[in-house]
Image: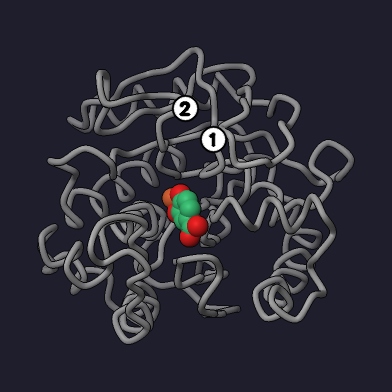
Amino acid sequence: MAKIIGGLTTSHIPAVGNAIARDMQQDDYWKPFFDAYPPIHEWLDKHKPDVAINIYNDHGLGFFLDQMPTFAIGAAHEYINEDEGWGIPVMPPFKGDARLSWHIIEGMVNDEFDITSCQELAVDHGFTVPMQLFWPGLGKNPNLPRAIPISANTVQHPIPTLKRALDFGKSLGRAIRSYPEDIKVVILGTGGLSHQLDGERAGFINREFDEMCMEKIVTDPEALTKISRHELVEKAGAQGTEFLMWMMMRGALGDKVNPLLKNYHIPISNTGAGTMLLECIDD
Ligand code: DHB
Ligand code: FE
């Protein structure tokens, strides 16, 4: 049967993609951020997951305000990346796992989650930057897993509640664990933490709130479901709603996790950047 081995979180700031493209990881500005990743690479080298479920939020490349699914799951054999105008080099297509995608969609719809299935999907920086951070070199990296994108709406209100996001993850976890093939799966929850890119509060970052979220996502994710969407925007900024991705990831991991790595660094561009490696504990 398929096994979920752990969860990874990271911010997906496009400037990180630029720093990778220009080999700036050791510069003073970038080093405290990039230093979190080598221990994760070691863990991935040791466990070699076959599939990465990449939970991200599309920012207008795959979907736009005219058509905005609340929850969308990729069901393609490959996913293309296109130029969004950030100056990040366009990446070659990412290999999918359509069989597992359909198994997940089937399981989650049976579980009463209404899913938009996508047999074609362009993936943006929310998906590609984390893939590059965790598997440097992408196609040249022998450990690059097959990937399944899952996107939730954090852009156009009403967005899902934190409770719905955690419940989505729980259902996702059940669907993956019922897959009959013996594969190892890692779940990525990307985006966040606090940031606001526009309006009067542009540049807003809330370290205290981010640190509380990073603690509770390990020890008591249920407590985070008490935060309303309005409060999330107030405390984390308009784009801090990307924390929903972390909640979806966490739900899939089961009750107890072992936090093997935690890094928080501000500022990276306009964002509080959080990185975590949470290993699943077998029941
Ligand atoms: C930034 C952060 C994001 O989440 C994003 O999607 C784009 C830009 C930033 O901090 O620059
Ligand atoms: Fe974003």
CB atoms of marks 2 and 1 within 8 Å: yes
Mark 2 falls on what kind of element? loop
> In the depicted view, which residue is nearer to us: 160 or 174?
160
Q: Which residue is mark 2?
A: 61
Which x, y percent locates residue 121?
A: 50, 20
The amino acid at mark 1 is Asp
> Is any part of residue 205 visible from this angle?
yes
The amino acid at mark 2 is Leu
Which x, y percent locates residue 4?
A: 53, 52
**Mark drawn on residue 79:** none
Q: Would you place residue 281 above or below residue 61 in this image?
A: below
For marks 2 and 1 on the same chain, the one whose residue lies earlier in the sequence:
2
Give the residue furthest to the bottom.
208
Residue at (46% x, 43% y) in the render = 177
> In the depicted view, which residue is nearer to us: 25 or 169?
25
**Quarter placement of the C terminus:** bottom left
Residue at (12% x, 67% y) in the render = 231
In the image, taking residue 65 as reference, residue 159 lies left or right, namely: left
Residue at (47% x, 24% y) in the render = 74
Q: Would you place residue 81 above or below residue 219 in this image?
A: above
In the image, taking residue 36 as reference, residue 22 lies left or right, namely: right
